[in-house]
Image: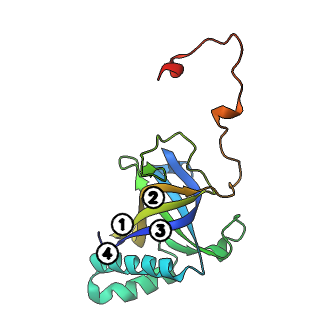
Amino acid sequence: MSDSRVMLRNVRLAFPVLNEPEQFQGSGPYRYSATLLIPSSDTAQLDNVKKAMRAAAAAKFGEEKADAAVKALTAANKVALGNGDNKADYDGFEGCMFVSAHSRDNAPPKLLDGQRNELPRSTGTIYAGCMVNASVEFWGQANEYGKRINAQIRGVQFAGDGDAFAASRPASADEFDVVEGAEATDADFA
């Protein structure tokens, strides 16, 4: 496993764009994304994130400049790790750090259930507010758009239910009764 890759365990998922890629605020490339909330008290996971960020900085900017790059980019808010206390107006962010991770539209993150079975993108099993394990890889950027340390979302595994953000979880088919006299559709035979 790459030094810039980290497995975040039992973190809360916010702002998931995992079913279909979307543009950020209606412009730019289409991408998948997720925000992963880590309690500020979880120093072990946060230390792993910081080590992965440093490894990404060393790979991009050189070993001798890695520490200074991480420090400067963090101070300029140009890293994928943020302080949730600065976004306290968002439900669930206070008292947490967060990793904002993205993936290009041609590299969708793998979605898994708790048994490591791949999930169809539209199941609703993984939702905003649930607990997940997430594979994230940090990478350094230095181009015409500036210098940053970004994160790619590689895979998300459902780890447990949580309080849903904004809207509740999608309804289950078991909540509904069969409509008397309704004809079967092609979906009934899939």
Mark 2 is surrounded, within 10 Å at the Cα level, by few (under 14), some (14 to 19) or many (20 or more) other residues, namely: many
Precedes in sequence: disc 3 or disc 1 = 3
Tag 1–tag 2 contact (CB < 8 Å): no
Precedes in sequence: disc 3 or disc 2 = 3
Precedes in sequence: disc 1 or disc 2 = 2
Residue 35 position, x and y percent, is 55, 62
Mark 3 or mark 1, which is nearer to you? 3
Q: Which residue is mark 4?
A: 3
Q: Which residue is mark 1?
A: 144
Looking at the image, residue 39 lies above or below residue 64: above
Precedes in sequence: disc 2 or disc 4 = 4
As measured in the structure, the alpha-carbon distance from the residue carrying label 1 to the one carrying label 2 is: 19 Å
Instruction: Name the residue nearer the viewer: 13 or 79.
Output: 13
Mark 1 or mark 4, which is nearer to you? 4
Tag 2–tag 4 contact (CB < 8 Å): no
- Is residue 136 at all visible to an observer of this figure? yes
Q: Which residue is mark 3?
A: 8
Outermost residue toward the front in this view: 115
